[in-house]
Amino acid sequence: MPGSLRIGKIFGIDIYIHISWVIILVLLTWSLAVGWFPVLYHGFSAVTYWVLGFIAAVLLFVSVLLHELAHSLVARARGLPVKNITLYIFGGVSNIEKEPGSPGIEFQIAVVGPLTSLLIGVLAFVFFFLLGQYSPALGAILWYLGLANILLGIFNLIPGFPLDGGRVLRSIVWKIDGNLRRATRIVTVVGQIIAYLFILAGIWLFFVGYFIDGLWLGFIGWFLLSSAQSANSEVMLQSVFRGVTVSEVMNTAPTTVPANISLQKLVDEYFLPLGLRSAFVIQGDRLAGLITLSDIRHVPREEWGQTPVGLAMIPRDRLHIVSPQQSLNDVLPLMAGRDVTGKKPRKSYTNKTTFPVVLRSAMTLWASTACSSRKV
Ligand SMILES: [Zn+2]
């Protein structure tokens, strides 16, 4: 995600924070400090409420991170490489480089996230009952974390694709029916129906006077709807290429260029007239490397006349080689990732976690107290 900052590495997986995360951290801290904690717990100082709000908000994000780590670690254990985890305004995303190849693997990767949240929630409640009586402040945080994580687990189990629950449902339908494309269509339709129900409920709440609740619910619906639609088109594209091998689409007589010509000559006599984005470079009669448009762009234009292709190319030992029998679905992300096609990288399989319901409950409480204090 552009606008993301790397904050560290856990189990070899890079953890990023998106700029939008700061907004939600501030919003959540504020709504907890001004609404949630003062309403439920009396007698703390204003500073204490803000400290409680901040700690609870940060711990909620730690919980979201653990939820994402659970997805990522199971994915990696099942042979799917994990690029990174990003925290952003709607929660967290695990960027996994490949779609799961079987319904069993998809079920395991999807279900482990909400189970982790439910487990954290239960543990928080257990610690609340053990320790809450000794420290009211600690008890307040544990109670909030317990509630938030249980809601997080339940919300993400809603069977609308691409929420975790949608993926769980898809793996079950896929297993029974054996057809991934049909399973995907069914669960994205379910996902869109659920999204429209959220939007309708939001509109209804808005017009009966619950403005913030209504807006928030509508916002969740809109988010679910756009996610379901993009997930559907992504999977449809993948299923089109399912079973297609490299040998069926590859060019058996690609254009080759000599290594000793200049970049200027390469652009003028090969790339522009032939509409190429890349070409193999030949030295003598053997393959020396590959030259692509992005390699040329890295060289300043005034140096094109003096720079030989052999100097700007990717040498053969650094090329990623695939076999004609390999599946196109495995090779396309490699090509996009290495900019061989000159096009933007395709989106990879992502596992999103959202917690708008959690935020909403805090916001709502804040809103209702704001209204009641105004009436008084
Ligand atoms: Zn999840």
Image (cartoon, grey):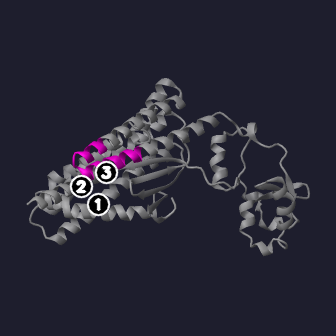
In the rendered structure, which disc, 2 or 3, sits on the residue that comes first in sequence? 3
Q: Position of residue 185 (x, y in %)?
A: 49, 32
Residue for badge 2:
362
Q: Is residue 153 above or below residue 131?
A: above
Is 197 situated left or right of 86 in this image? left
- Callout 1: SS: helix
Q: Which mark is residue 216?
A: 3
Q: Quadrant of the C terminus?
A: bottom left
- Residue flagged by tag 2: what amino acid is it? Ala
Q: Classify mark 3: helix, strand or loop.
A: helix
Is there any visible trace of residue 135 in the rendered image?
A: no
Work out whether residue 209 or residue 270 is closer to the camera in this orientation and state it: 209
Locate residue 131, reporting x and y percent: 15, 56
**Does any portion of residue 311 appear in the rendered image?**
yes
Q: Which residues are magenta?
A: 201-224
Q: Quadrant of residue 200?
A: top left
Residue most toward the front?
Answer: 207
